[in-house]
Amino acid sequence: MDDQHEEVEHIPWGELLTSPDDGRRRMIDLAAGALGAVVLGMVLARLFSSAPDPAPVAVEAPVATAAPQVSVVTVPVAVPETTSATTTSTTVPAPILYREADLMAFPPEWEARAAAARAEWFVTDFFTADLEPNGVADVRGALPAGVMLPEMPQDGAVGLSYVEWARAAWVEAGPDGIYRVRVVYRMLGAPPDRGFQRLPVRAVEVRVAVSDSGGTVVVDLPSPVTLPPGPDPQPWPEAAEEAPQAVVDGAMSAVAGWGSEHRLLSSARVTGGWRVMLTAADELGNRWPLTVYVDEAGMPM
């Protein structure tokens, strides 16, 4: 009996205990892998379906926080401090810096305008001889200091005169920096024994010097010049023709704001449309003849 070998069955309790956990862990791993694949797919889909975020734009000339010690004028540019991720970034323009010399510069065309304005002003004062107590003070103030003027009509006017209008018609810059301005003007004159009358239109040339800052001075007395003849225009159309009603209505509408009681005088064909002559009364009761050019539809040409 002692030599009899007894076999006892051994139950693997450890394997029984660990097997279910391994199954659950395997299921958890599979679930986690599937979930990760779903998340990865969603991320990739979003990346391919939406545009990438705009890259920041570098500004080569950043806005300086402290102004340098030079005489400049800075034109500020509004730059937002923060930019939302959903907004589209734009390039911020660099600030425009103007030097003081640039701001004080006087463009050449302005010099010509300054000379023309001074010449018109001078002609108005020069040819006005009335009872003003200042006499030739305005004329003398426009000329260089210390000049000696001859006797002027303003000193003891025999007849009264006023400049009705003065217009600069031609300006030329001379090699010495002096502008030669031709001024066309018209005077109203009253002899001692008669009332005012309009004198013929005349022209003079005035020499004007202009400084860098825009100041002007007349360098000499006016020089008489002759008005150049005008071109030969085309004659008025002679053959009158009754215009369509649309043409007449268009011409009347074109002059609706000028005077009242418009009356048609005649109409004639011209290149591209019609020439309509009519009359209109002003506030004084005077009736003035006028012409209007309109196309076939009655629109102004």
Image (spheres, rainbow, N blue to C red):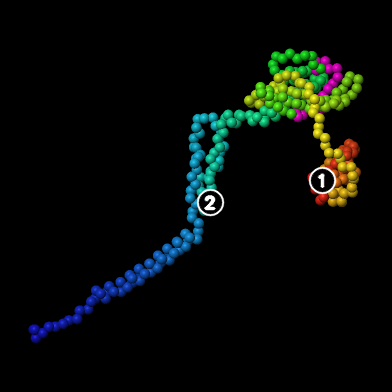
Q: Which residues are magenta?
A: 154-169
Residue 162 magenta-drawn? Answer: yes
Instruction: Measure the alpha-carbon separation of dots 2 and 1.
Output: 55 Å
Q: Which residue is located at x 82 percent, y 50 percent?
A: 296
**Residue 32 at what x, y percent from top left?**
38, 67
In the rendered image, the quadrant that contains the N terminus is bottom left
Q: Is residue 144 left or right of residue 64?
A: right
**Residue 162 at what x, y percent from top left?**
82, 24
Depth order, front residue of 88/114 = 114
**Residue 18 at what x, y percent from top left?**
27, 73
Q: Which residue is mark 1?
A: 271
Q: Which secondary structure class fits the magenta region best?
A: strand
Q: Secondary structure at mark 2?
A: loop
**Which is nearer the N-term, disc 2 or disc 1?**
2
Amino acid carrying label 2: it is Thr
- Which numbered disc, 2 or 1, marks the residue closer to the eye? 1
**Residue 233 at what x, y percent from top left?**
83, 37
Amino acid carrying label 1: it is Thr
Q: Is residue 246 shown to the viewer in this render?
A: yes
Q: Which residue is located at x 84 percent, y 21 percent?
A: 160
Q: Is residue 280 shown to the viewer in this render?
A: no
Q: Is residue 224 left or right of residue 194?
A: left
Q: Is residue 270 left or right of residue 86?
A: right
Q: Which residue is mark 2?
A: 88
